[in-house]
Image (cartoon, coloured by chain):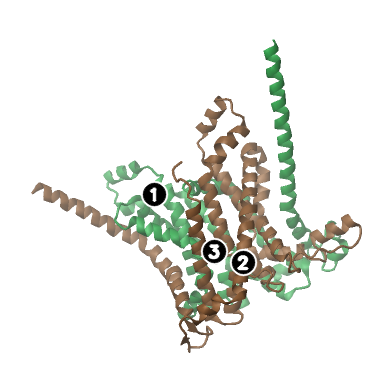
Chain colours: A green, B brown
Amino acid sequence: MAKENVKDTDYRAAKIKSTIAWTIAIIFACIMLVITLTPFFFMIMNSFRKQFDMLQQGVFHLPDPWHFQNYVTVITNGFFGYFIRSVIVVSISLVLMLIIASFAAYPLARMDFKLNPIIYAIIVAMMAVPMHVTLIPIFKLTQTLGFYDSLKALIGPYVSFALPMSVFILTAFMKTIPKEIEESAEIDGCNRYKNFFFMILPLSKSGLSTLAIYNGVSMWNEFAFANTLLISPQNKTLPLALGQFKGEHAMDIPMIMAVLTLSVMPMIILFIIFQDKLVKGMMAGAVKG
Amino acid sequence: MKREKKVGLAQAKARSTAAAATVFLIPALLLITIFIVYPVIDTFVISGFKWNGISSDRTFIGLDNWSALLHDEMFWKSFKHNLIVMVFSILLQIPLGMLLATFLDAGGKKFNIFKIIWFLPYLMSSVAIAFLFTYALATNGGIISSLATIIQGKKTTIDLLGNANNALYTVIGVMAWQFTPFYMVYFIAGYGNIDTTIYEAAVIDGATRWQYLKHIAIPLLGPIFKTACTMSLIGSLKYFDMIWNMTQGGPAGATELMATYMYKLSFQQFNMSYGSTVAAGMFILITAIALIFNKLFKVKEDY
């Protein structure tokens, strides 16, 4: 009887302890929520104000009246052009990059040849190269090739700088596909090339989709190459549009907030749709660390 | 006879493997050579010249740029800023990311909304974040100053970006806002990779969720923790986009980093040869620090 009582109080103490821990955790979580959301709140609320309402109304008031004109002005002032150019560059670079990365990952994961570990090590080491070290030579190179100030100039650097990380992740991913699948395909008369296109590539789909999300986000947001290699407004991509609009409407903060809101919306929508894929893909990449 | 034929077959197989591997690897190796390897080498080559980046005449000056770099106060000051950013990035972003991931892992699916919202900053481009925080932290109409005004009951301004004493720490805070979500997802993935049977075994042995996290899950994250630190380290040493758009290294060089300094020299002052020297110096320093870090924190790979 006495023993039962001790157990009961122990259990109750543990329960209280866990409730306290959870309360602290939830308070902390809510604080983090506020810190995360306040800048977004600032951005979206101000994008619906008139230029001079922002300072008069203060940050914490809802817009009064709600002013949609900023969005109309931004969209009719060439925002769509920046948007389309970004879509073009990102989709071409992404498709090329995924094809080339899976090409490279296949032999590294599946074939036994002498140079395999060396080539793998070289490609992985390229992950640590900061893009700024390559900026001046690439600036020179695009001028020599006649690509300077055109979207073509961005594709080479975007693909190349996304490759090392992607090859690294895809190689780890392809190693997890059972060997027997290829062996049985070989018996059925598939050669290596057929194996790759009809077996390995379809089975790597989930790895490829994460890489597409990650590299898509970073290419969509890329600034330094774009800022160096593009000069005329009619050739610039979305991250540069922000500077362009800021230059034209420096004092009109609500207008700039509308540009900012419009430029993050596509990413947020895509993320909400694909968020599970993101974590799953990172799990594949994080296995090996 | 028979044996010879066997060797021949094995050789032929090896040869066809090598041929296939070459075909598959060529596009990637070609691109990496053209856009990464060659430019890195070229940066070192340019650092031996005096050249403005545009005119065709460039004169070879040997190691003059390099000796200038060694005595360049601005470069070493910006390197020091990079080191400060690095230390605070690792101390802020990674523990916070891990805390958030632990919370989400313990809470399960019902906290999904937290995960979605916490991840949002990472979706914004560095440029957009720079512009947003330029205004959100402004003395006039910014969030912090407005908040201070309400609390104090009178007009109060807190100058976070314009004051050389604290601008760097403000930038570090904004960087934490931007990158913590990345490490959060990284650690969520890490938790997800732990075999569920380990958790089940722990529960059968009477462990609570917290005991499981403390004694099993977090120690198992060791290698992932190290990779996260390496990523944060390299990332903060080459940091550029947000600072360039927010402060351009100012006020008075208080937020100058190696990359912004290099960009300023090369593409604003068109001193490309010295800009290349700064870039090459940056490359050497980052590689050295990354290697030292990897030596110091050798975590056993097999777990």
Q: Can residue B172 be seen here?
A: yes
Please, which chain is the residue tagged with disc 3 on? A
Query: Do the numbered discs 1 and 3 sit on residues whose CB atoms are within 8 Å?
Result: no
Q: Is residue A70 left or right of residue B223?
A: right
Q: Residue A130: which disc?
A: none
Which of the labelled discs sits on residue B80, or is there none? 2
Instruction: State the separation of the CA atoms marked 1 and 3.
Output: 25 Å
Q: Farthest residue in the top direction?
A: A1
Q: Give the label on residue A200, or none.
A: 1
Q: Where residue A124 sits in the image (x, y, percent)?
A: 44, 58
> How many marks do you count on the picture?
3
Q: Amino acid at mark 3?
A: Val
Residue A151 visible, this orientation: no
Q: Position of residue B205 (x, y in %)?
A: 55, 25
The amino acid on which the numbered mark 2 sits, given as a three-letter code, is Lys
Q: For the residue marked with disc 1, what is the amino acid?
A: Ile
Please tell me whether mark 3 sits on a helix, a strand or a loop. Answer: helix
- Identify the residue under disc 3: A90
Q: Residues within 10 Å of mark 2 (few under 14, many from 20)?
A: some
- The residue closer to the viewer here, B239 or A205, is B239
Report the residue that reaches farthest toward the bottom. Answer: B57
Q: Is residue B118 above or below residue A6?
A: below
